[in-house]
Image: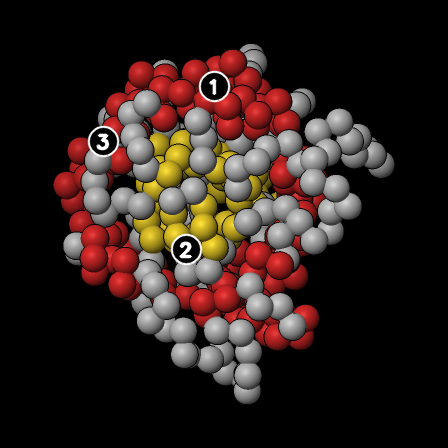
Amino acid sequence: MSDASRNTSLGTSDATAEPEGLSSHPSDAALATTIGALKLRNPIMLASGTVGYGPEYEGLIDFESVGAIVTKTITRAPREGNAPPRLAETTGGLLNAIGLENVGLDVFLNEKLPEAAALPTALVASVAGGSPDEFAELALAVGDRNEIDAVEINISCPNIERARRPVWDDPAAVAGIVSAARGATSKTLIVKLSPSTADIASVAESAETAGADALVVANTMPGMRIDIERMRPALGNVTGGLSGSAILPINLANVWKVAGCVSIPVIGSGGIASTGDAIEYLMAGARAFQVGTALFSDPEAAVAIAEGLLRDMETREFETIGEYVGLAREESRVCTEQIPAG
């Protein structure tokens, strides 16, 4: 698909289509938002790892109703991932220890990308490397492809990190990775942060200073369960990443903190399953948000959220989605604000 045809398909060609039951409402164009140079028809992004490379969910998800999809994370060489079991349900969420299983850079570019690029939504490529140079190599390779609209740097996967002082908790290490990737591509550069850090504000500021265009706040929380019948950890990797509604309050607090410390856009992520959840993230200061685990139980969750946003905007008499952003904040910068622990 050419750049011209992709821009047309991502624009407002569906602006006159009304969600069922709405007699009058803001046009779909009212949902449009911008993340760096990335223009989204609405603020809904499908999180990395939840829709594969994209085409796997064709027929289950209406991709014309979402702003973008983020591919599963790509590494330079193929990865088999972690030993099974890789998934474990838990109260309020899901533990996963996939271990970044993927086909590798070459197969992605030659086989997966052409199919993903045909989907009628923006395409964000997620990448992960073992060093700044490797991140730069991956950012260059995917950023050079016209089919890819933005690059997401995954520095926060809890299933493959070093045990002591993970990269995501080290502002200097994060700055080195982001700076290397920034020097390799002019595409919108999004950095996915971890909630498992003592000072997410410092990490966020380091990423911004190093050249990030936007920040995803945040990835999953490390966690585990034990299978008491087998008397062994429920996951083959022992620990995994906790996603779902259980982490919404944690990541929402992190969005609040980060949005007050940086000037670049924040993308909320974690536990979003309803319009109300999404609005909370927007009111905390996010400019867009990612839906993930909710898609496993309801592939139409993103469509329902888009329609719900239009209804809520009509009720509030909002003309643009931007009117939600930061609405709950009393001040714009809260780097030194202490969020009570309990």
Q: Nearer the viewer, residue 280 or 89?
A: 280
Horizontal side, residue 4 vs residue 161: left or right: left
Q: Which residue is mark 3?
A: 141
Give the quadrant of the C terminus: top right
The numbered mark at residue 40 is 2
Q: Mark 1 to mark 3: distance in Å?
A: 20 Å
Please give the name of the residue rendered at 50% of the width and 23% of the height, measured from the top-left corner. Answer: 209
Helix, strand or loop at label 1? It is helix
User: What amino acid does circle 3 point to?
Assistant: Ala
Q: Quadrant of residue 255?
A: top right
How many C-alpha atoms fall within 10 Å of the one at disc 3: few (<14), some, or many (≥20)?
A: some
Residue 130 drawn at (x, y percent): 36, 18
Horizontal side, residue 328 vs residue 126: left or right: right
Residue 86 drawn at (x, y percent): 45, 38
Residue 330 drawn at (x, y percent): 77, 46
Q: Which residue is mark 1?
A: 175
Label whose residue precedes the other's in the sequence (1 or 3): 3
Q: Is residue 116 above or below residue 65?
A: above
Label whose residue precedes the other's in the sequence (2 or 3): 2
Q: Mark 2 to mark 3: distance in Å?
A: 23 Å
Q: Nearer the viewer, residue 104 or 9?
A: 9
Give the quadrant of the N terminus: bottom left
Helix, strand or loop at label 2? It is strand
Total marks placed: 3
User: What amino acid does circle 2 point to?
Assistant: Leu
Q: Is residue 212 above or below residue 308?
A: above
How many C-alpha atoms fall within 10 Å of the one at disc 1: few (<14), some, or many (≥20)?
A: many
The numbered mark at residue 66 is none
User: What amino acid does circle 1 point to?
Assistant: Ala
Label whose residue precedes the other's in the sequence (2 or 1): 2
Q: Nearer the viewer, residue 271 or 262?
A: 262
